[in-house]
Structures are given as C-alpha cells and as structure tokens.
Amino acid sequence: MMKELFVNFIDSNNISCELKVNISNRFLKIPAIGFLAVNYDISENSKFILASRDEYFKTVDGNREVVPGVVVYINNDELKVINGIQRPNDVMVAENGNFIINDWMSSKELNGTFYAINSELKILLKKKFNSNLGKNAISENGEYALLETLVSKSEDGNSIFFFDLKNSELLWRKTREYGNIKEFTLDTSNRVLKINYLNNRISNYNF
C-alpha cells in the first residue's frame, strides 16, 4: 500500500516549494528531486522520517562516475537534504527527532563512521572505527544509542558501544559474546538492554 504526503522544501537557490513523498513498505521516493531509498525509518510518533541512498556508480559518456550518498530528513512537514556522508546506511530516528546513521565509507579498508544527529541537524556524536559497522539502535526517546562493530584486526572490532546522546558521550563498551547481532532492544523504563544474536543467544545488560 502506497502512502503519499506533501512536505516543504527550500532548494539551493533558496526557493521554497512543495514536494510529494511516496512511501510503501519497500521504498521511499521523492520524484521531484530524483530520490529513491529502500533504507528508511519513521519515528513511533510519525513526526520524523529518515531515509538514505547509498553511494553508487553510473556511466556517463563512457566514463564511470560516483554518485554520492545522500540522506533525507523530514521533521513534521519540513524536508532537509543532508550531504557529505559517503555511504549512509542503517538509519534510525527517535520520537524527539534524534537520529543515527552508519556510514560504511568509500574505502577498501575495514572502517566506518557512526553519526548521531539531533532534529536541528547538529551532530551529537561522530566516531570513526577501524572496523566495519553492524547493527545499531536508538531508544524511542532518543537519549541512548547502540552500535555493533564487526570483526577486524584493530582494537575497535567485535564490540558493542553504548552511547548517551544527551551528553554526547560513550557510557561503556563490551566485547560481543556470541558473534553477529540480530537485534538490540532498549528498555528505558527499567534501564535494561537486550541483545539478540543471530545464533539465538541472548544477553542482557543494565544501562
């Protein structure tokens, strides 16, 4: 089922216009700016929408060109386009408008950059890791975030990082116990987080 909504957008020439956004359970599309994303998230209160399109290559006149990654952020009825994140993936947005992004980065090395950004597009956290990035999560209230790093030879790998976004700091880091992670669940009322691994093992930690 397709959902349509209309948002306000100010372009690079400072001209305001209204754009149509098409959302299905498979993709988010904004035809007027040529944006199509299969990677998107909507906050529980439906006030915020976050979508990303990964970097890709296209051929122009026989030459292979890079099309940079782009992020689209909708705050109520206002749309913002965020450039400068090389390969944005794994986007998640909370009820207060805070959001997180894993940048897979354009490199043959094992690395990635984790971003946490607020509703005014201020960067709360930006941390580069010398490992590829796995699962991430943000609490519904937008105050906490989690990140998994995958196996690498660096000290950054095979770990879970737990961040306090209110104070823009790392609360703790732990080694993954059972391999790759399937899902994080954050219970802010009881200050407990549950980690579901792909092999069906479960770990619980307090904040």
Image: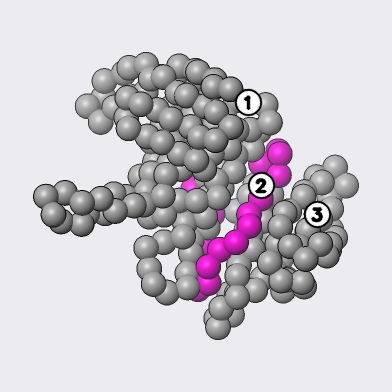
Magenta segment, which residues?
122-143
Residue 1 sits in which quadrant? top right
**Residue placed at 45% from the left, 16% from the top?**
6
Q: Amino acid at mark 1?
A: Ser
Let me know if residue 85 appears in the view.
Answer: no
For the residues labelled 3 and 2, the Cα–Cα distance comes to 11 Å
Q: Position of residue 181 (x, y in %)?
A: 70, 62
6 left or right, relative to 94: left
Residue at numbered disc 2 = 138
- The residue carrying pointer 3 sits among few (fewer than 14), some (14 to 19) or many (20 or more) residues within 10 Å by Cα, namely some
Q: Which mark is residue 46?
A: 1
- The residue carrying pointer 1 sits among few (fewer than 14), some (14 to 19) or many (20 or more) residues within 10 Å by Cα, namely few
Q: Earlier in the sequence, mark 3 or mark 2?
A: 2
Tag 2 and tag 1, C-beta contact below 8 Å: no
Q: Amino acid at mark 2?
A: Ile
Let me know if residue 206 appears in the view.
Answer: yes
Q: In the displayed structure, would residue 202 be above or below residue 54? A: below
Q: Amino acid at mark 3?
A: Leu
Residue at numbered disc 3 = 193
Q: Earlier in the sequence, mark 3 or mark 1?
A: 1
- SS label for mark 3: strand
